[in-house]
């Protein structure tokens, strides 16, 4: 029932699927009120294997889209908490899929596994450099999923994304500017950008993200050469994004107050890489539909339609 899960639910419903959202909280957020009565909600905990099994059995689940995770800040605050939610939670999902014969497990991974100083361009087989607990857990889950595919035949596939943006994404200090600058402008609210406005970032829009996850599930298994794929949208700076925002909202109240600390530079640099999409196109026929102009325009329209708190 998080950022990716809510947007994915909408995509699956549009395709005629029956959707069950699995989350500790029992109520939909106000931004997802359009899903009320259209989805089932399992108020459960990913660290409770019995609850997972009961939910999968009760709803006769055929595909699990695994987007539950403790993010970077939470993992840094507690390595054990990151391991328990991200790694043990994934093991619970995989083992439930094995025991109950769930055909597909589609996993949301991260470009963070390429490290805090990634090369200018990364490929699907670029060595992963695990420099924080979040990246460590994500890479561990990728290997676990590959093992369950080898050993038990589960169709495990994962997608690595860099900076995912879209309505309702959490607007945090170090990673929130890329979504926040668009969302707040569309809401008619002021926004102060603290990241380097000229630092390029590897973007992907949430609608391309959910389409990537669905495409992985639908893919002809005979064409897949790997279990984990990179998915890339486009490169842009916050200055470029702001310029496009002002084409649609000329009076947008956007201010730049660049935080030049080493910590901010590190976070900005960690997003300054391009992902190669050759394998996703060759194996899945996938390519991004939303580049900079299309992403900003659609994002603004979604917010104005009520797609954000």
Image (tube, rainbow, N blue to C red):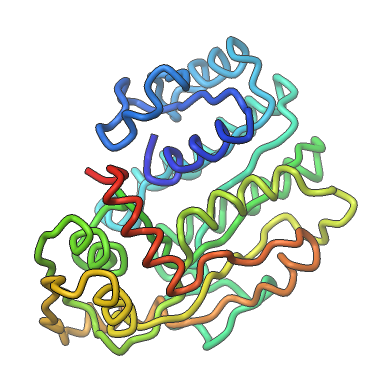
Tell me if 94 is positioned left or right of 120 in this view: right
Q: How many marks?
A: 0
Q: Residue 32 is drawn in which quadrant? A: top left
> Which residue occupies the foreground of this view, 277 or 93?
277
Q: Residue at x 35, y 51 (%)?
A: 302
Q: Residue 5 is drawn in which quadrant? A: top left
> Which residue occupies the foreground of this view, 210 or 125?
210
Can you say which quadrant of the picture contains the N terminus?
top left
281 up-or-down from 147: above or below: below
Can you say which quadrant of the picture contains the C terminus?
top left
Q: Residue 80 is drawn in which quadrant? A: top left
Q: Residue at x 18, y 55 (%)?
A: 187
Q: Position of residue 117 (x, y in %)?
A: 43, 83
Residue sitting at the far top: 58
Q: Residue at x 48, y 59 (%)?
A: 136
Q: Residue at x 28, y 37 (%)?
A: 31
132 up-or-down from 43: above or below: below
Q: Position of residue 294 (x, y in %)?
A: 46, 68
Tell me if 188 is positioned left or right of 108 in this view: left
């Amino acid at each position: 029932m998080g950022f990716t899960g809510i947007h994915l639910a909408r995509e699956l419903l549009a395709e005629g699927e029956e959707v069950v959202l699995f989350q500790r909280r029992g109520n939909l957020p106000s931004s997802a009120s359009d899903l009320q009565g259209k989805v089932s909600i399992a108020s459960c905990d990913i660290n409770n294997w019995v609850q997972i099994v009961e939910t999968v059995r009760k709803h006769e689940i055929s595909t699990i889209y695994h987007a539950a995770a403790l993010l970077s800040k939470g993992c840094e605050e507690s390595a054990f908490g990151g391991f328990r939610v991200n790694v043990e939670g994934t093991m619970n999902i995989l083992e439930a899929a094995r025991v109950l014969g769930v055909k597909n497990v589609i996993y949301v991974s991260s470009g963070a596994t390429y490290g805090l100083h990634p090369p200018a361009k990364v490929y699907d087989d670029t060595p992963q450099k695990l420099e924080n607990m979040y990246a460590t857990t994500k890479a561990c889950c990728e290997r676990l999923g590959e093992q369950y595919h080898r050993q038990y035949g589960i169709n495990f596939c994962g997608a690595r994304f860099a900076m995912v943006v879209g309505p309702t994404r959490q607007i945090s200090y170090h990673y929130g500017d890329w979504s926040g600058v668009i969302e707040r402008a569309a809401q008619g609210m002021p926004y102060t950008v603290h990241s380097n406005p000229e630092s390029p970032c590897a973007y992907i829009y949430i609608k391309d993200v959910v389409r990537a996850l669905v495409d992985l599930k639908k893919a002809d298994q005979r064409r897949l050469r790997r279990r984990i794929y990179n998915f890339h949208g486009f490169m842009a700076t916050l200055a470029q994004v702001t310029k496009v925002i002002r084409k649609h909202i000329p009076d947008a109240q956007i201010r730049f107050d660049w935080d030049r600390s080493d910590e901010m530079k590190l976070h900005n640099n960690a997003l300054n890489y391009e992902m190669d999409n050759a394998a996703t196109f060759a194996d899945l026929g996938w390519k991004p539909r939303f580049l900079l102009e299309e992403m900003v325009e659609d994002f603004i329209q979604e917010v104005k339609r009520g797609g954000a708190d």
